[in-house]
Amino acid sequence: MRASSFSYLSKQGVKSLWSNRMMTLASVGVLTACLLIVGFAVLLTENINNMVKFVEQQNEFKAFVYTEKAYNQMLTDKNEETIVPSYETKPGEENQWLGVLEKIEQEIKKIDNVSSVELVTKEEGIEEMKKQLGPEQASLLDDYKGEDNPLNDSFTVTVDDLSLLDKTISEVEKIEGIEIVTAASEAASTLTSIRNIINVVGWAIIGALVIVSLVIITNTIRASIFTRRKELNIMKYVGATNSFIRLPFIIEGICLGLLSALIAFGVIWVGYEAVLNTFVDKVSSQWLQEAFRSIIPFEDVALQLGGFFAISSIVIGVLGSVVSIRNHIKV
Amino acid sequence: MIELVDVSLKYDNETTAVDNLNLKIEQGEFVFIVGSSGAGKSSIIKLLLRERVATSGIVKVNGYNLNKIKKRKIPEFRRSLGVVFQDFRLIPNLNVFDNVAFSLRVTNASPKYIRTRVPYILELMGLTDKAKRFPHELSGGEQQRVALARALVNDPPMIIADEPTGNVDPELSYEIVSLLKEINDCGTTVIMVTHEHDIVRYFGGRTISIQKGKIEYDGYLGGNDESE
């Protein structure tokens, strides 16, 4: 086909959009809405995936050691020799409690899946709490020193393989001196199941909307064919090939799709940024702020989403046109 | 040029529109096909345009065997014909120039050729001053001349005119047929379907009368056209 013919036929397709402007407006509106829902589903899935990854990266748990008093009580119950608590250890004497902590640390390190172990002493725990309370209220904790410190010493344990987390935890729990273990594994599994549901629902929505979009495009092109049926008939009698007849309608379908994709993309971009900025600034909870920080910036998904919109709208446009013109070129 | 051998056309395998018809039309002939409505004239035209395929028999037009022609060859075949209809079939939103140029565009003609060929044909048809007009601004006779210009612009060896005078005033009807005669004088085969016996009697020439899908008469009538 000559470039001049292609350009002539393309112009006919674009002109047709204007001639049937009410139908064009309706289809662009509905198609945009469909793409918005699809885009929303895609972004939600991507973000949940990202959050799962974020939680998975927090592949650590806390193992709390008995307090020194409770530890000595345990030794007494077993008829073993007790240790001198750290707060009773005089300067220059061996700190037996530190020895116990080191022994526990070594035992944790021996477990296969453990990649690192970090000791957080009860003194560091109090300091951390003071920081969270802020400078004005930090003095409330000033009295919790030495024997009066109610916190436990703890270990922050990082694992290599998150799927073996439960096994690792139960192994740590068995170590003598460990009182309790807390982990974020529940959050990760909840998020994973949410992600799976969204994936299934998301694809179902996308599938349904693709069909809806096809029906809409097909109807618009049919209206366009109806207004140009004389022209089509004449085209056949003067020896136009099927591709020559199809092209303006395919161009019309592509334009409808791309126009809707462009609008939907813009709306999603602006909306996403607005929601993100509003929430990140206003949420006071540290955990939620942390979670929002893991939300994917739009720039990171823009290309993927734009490409998906462009390709799906072109495919739907072409398919809709081909389907609607099929019966009209049999002259 | 046109050869129909034992051709029959049945609709839904019941109604026989064309019944075992044999017909031969040579290059350069001017032929009237006459008959009352429902006689089978339009069905013959549909067969010649390959809008319908014969139920039996052989249909050959311009060297194409229309029973065996491949689908992708149909556009090429149709470009060897110029077709004129009773209802003109002009595109309402295109002006006279673009309506005529339309035939060339579908054949992938170059813009340069379109710019020279269309004004030439419009001049032949006496439509130069109407080039920018739209169909609704023209009289019936003028619209039919535009349709004729569109049929001629590709320089086809054959023109098929299906009741071309059906929608124009009687005096303009004679003008249209005169134009077809002039085209025929240049060597183009013209097949004109009509039910207007006055026109046939006036112009004369080879006349084929169809009745119930069969040829009732095929012969030459002497006309009253003094220009002949």
Image (cartoon, rainbow, N blue to C red):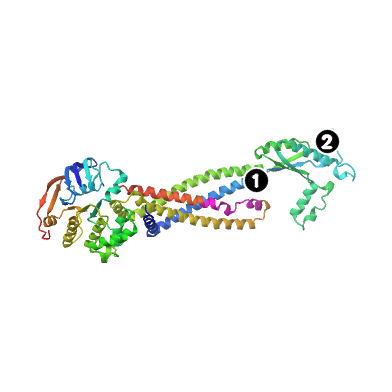
Q: Position of residue B134 (x, y in %)?
A: 29, 63
Nearer to the camera, B159 or A98:
B159
- In the rendered structure, does residue B8 fall within the stretch colored magenta? no
Q: Is residue A115 above or below residue B165?
A: above
Neighbour tally class for label 2: few under 14, some 14-19, many 20 plus, Cα within 10 Å = some
Residues tagged 2 and 1 counted as in contact (Cβ below 8 A):
no
| Residue type beneath disc 1 | Val
| Residue B97 appears in the figure | yes
- Residue A123: % across, % down: 80, 48
From the viewer's perspective, tell me whether residue A108 is left or right of residue B132. right
Residue at the image position 67 percent from the left and 55 percent from the top: A284
List the single residue furthest toward the bottom: B129
Q: How many numbered tags mark residues here?
A: 2
Residue neighbourhood size for the residue with mark 1, other residues' Cα within 10 Å, grouped as few (<14), some (14–19), many (≥20): some
How far apart marks 2 and 1 lie (CA) works out to 38 Å
Which is nearer the N-term, disc 2 or disc 1? 1
Q: Which residue is mark 2?
A: A75
> Would you say A112 lies left or right of B40 here?
right
Residue located at (59% from left, 53% from top) = A297
Magenta stretch: dominant secondary structure: helix
Query: Which dot, 2 or 1, sits closer to the camera?
Result: 1
Question: What residue do we see at 44% from left, 47% from top?
Answer: A211
Is residue A291 inside the magenta stretch?
yes
Residue A55 is marked as: 1
Q: Under tag 1, what secondary structure?
A: helix
The disc numbered 1 marks a residue on which chain?
A
Q: Residue at x 13, y 51 (%)?
A: B206
Q: Amino acid at mark 2?
A: Leu
The boundaries of the magenta stretch are: A288-306
Are discs 2 and 1 located on one and the same chain? Answer: yes
